[in-house]
Amino acid sequence: MKIEQIYTGCLAQGAYYIESEGEAVVIDPLREVRPYIQKAESNNARIKYVFETHFHADFVSGHLDLAKQTGAAIVYGPTAQPGFEAHIAKDGEELKVGKITFKVLHTPGHTMESTCFLLKDETGKDVAIFTGDTLFIGDVGRPDLAQKVKADLTQEKLASYMYDSLHNKIMPLADDVIVYPAHGAGSACGKNMSKETSDTLGHQKATNYALQPMPKEEFIKQLLTGLTAPPQYFPLNVLMNIQGYDSIDEVIKRGTQGLTADAFETAANETGALILDTRNAEVFAQGFIPNSINIGIDGSFAPWVGAMIPDLSQEILLVTDEGREEEVVTRLARVGYDHSIGYLKGGYNAWKESGKESDSIQRVSADEFAEAQTNGRINILDVRKKSEYDSEHIVDAENAPLDYINESMLLIDKNKTYYVHCAGGYRSMIFASTLKARGYENLIDVRGGMKAIKDSGKFKLTDYVCPTTML
């Protein structure tokens, strides 16, 4: 028996390849399925099943392409109603893969169809449980996403189901069972996930707040406390996973058409496509095509694309580092952005060499930022999340979270100059470039963000103080 976790950091997502005696199963695959197929081929194995723990919200799964290319059966748990052929397993049903067995455990709570797959070895011993978004390391799945698709599934109702699923299906299992979840820290599918990507169930029973002894009412209260609004693209990804989508091969072919500077400019003018520049923020700031939005590929790319581009059908033109075009198109497709229509051949240098108009964004170091503050009162925008701002921020800085950029831009007077920072410089350039494209010219980005600001030792910071209750 072979168990392999295939973890993708930018999505904080774990897919799984499990093999026994020439047969294999893939659990919660990403959109690009070739790596799973190659893995099976190299081991002379056949992919028999594709297990889906639920209809994912934070990424588009590769179940359809993988099933089509391998002949594997797609398996969902009870109540799932996909718009394509799939095996809807019964609660408690067992599926054989070589000499091992997977038992289906229906665990509604994150969604109604959420299902865990309990792996038993050839002797029948419980070895591991693949929990999807039901149980994470340090957390459990948030219960407020399904209502974005079906209104009568309130978060309170789903939280109640989650309590029952945990206590009736998962916690009775042996302590030495290994927990393999679908996500780790950084995913928006939970609120308190660990950086660890697997653990024993026994350790989780001892340390996970959601598995501690408590009445159902208290569990519901704890689970719902501190939830922030999910990314706007989540329900759209759910629908793609339910209804189906274009083959990843077609998406890549469409998006990796190389365009000359003239053809790129014509396409931008004629289609209304968004120009997405995925280069490093430092490089981007020095020169870019007017109205470009910068979301660097070497960061939390896919989630921020999902947060910043509301329409999955939006046509996108790409400016990338040379040789990374297919990577960018693939990573866009992971979260449902299938309408890339080409990239600038030769990159930004080709645009510059053509003599076409360019733009730039001013960046300053933390020391230069401090000098500006010393010379007089300045306007400071901290674009980190409210929780980050609350924990520590520059005195007199305003919080303008990137997550809520449409509301945050209301804080800005176009006639004033603002210094913009985040934690490390990635989000602040997304913010500055987005507003620049909307006509905000007076934004100065602080290089290195809060880390550089703190390292400089030149700023007065305020710590969060928990308010006391007046008796």
Image: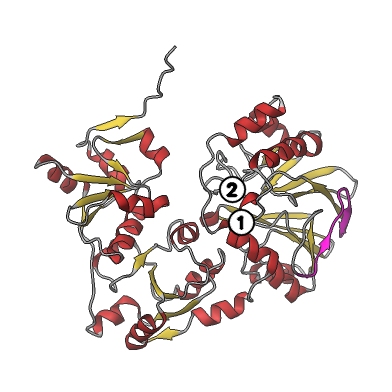
Q: Is residue 82 placed above or below 468 in the rendered structure?
A: below
Q: Amino acid at mark 2?
A: Cys
Q: Residues within 10 Å of mark 2 (few under 14, many from 20)?
A: many
- In the picture as drawn, the residue positioned furthest to the front comes out as 152
State the image coordinates of residue 207 (x, y, percent, origin top left): 63, 29
Residue in the picture at 42% in, 81% down: 271
Q: Is residue 322 above or below residue 2?
A: below
Q: State yes or no: residue 90 in magenta.
A: yes
Q: Position of residue 379 (x, y in %)?
A: 20, 45
Which is the main secondary structure of the residues drawn in magenta?
loop
The foreground one among 332 and 102 is 332
Quarter of image, res 309: bottom left
Query: For this rendering, which residue is in front, 236 or 1?
Result: 236
Callouts 1 and 2 close, C-beta under 8 Å: yes
Kindly identify which numbered label has been placed on residue 57: 1
Left/right placement of residue 270 relative to residue 172 reads left
Mark count: 2
Question: Three-letter amino acid code at disc 1?
Answer: Ala
Q: Which residue is mark 2?
A: 189
Q: Considering only vertical position in the picture, is 305 above or below 449?
A: below
The x, y position of residue 343, in whole percent, is 42, 79
Residue 70 location in percent, x, y?
76, 73
Task: Residue 153: tell me if it is visible.
Answer: yes
Going 26% across and 42% down the picture, which residue do you hit? 453
Left or right of 216? Residue 232 is left
Whole-number angstrom distance, CA of label 1 to CA of label 2: 8 Å
| Secondary structure beneath label 2 | loop
Q: Which residues are magenta?
A: 84-99
Mark 1 closeness class: few <14, some 14–19, many ≥20 residues within 10 Å: many
Circle 1 SS class: loop
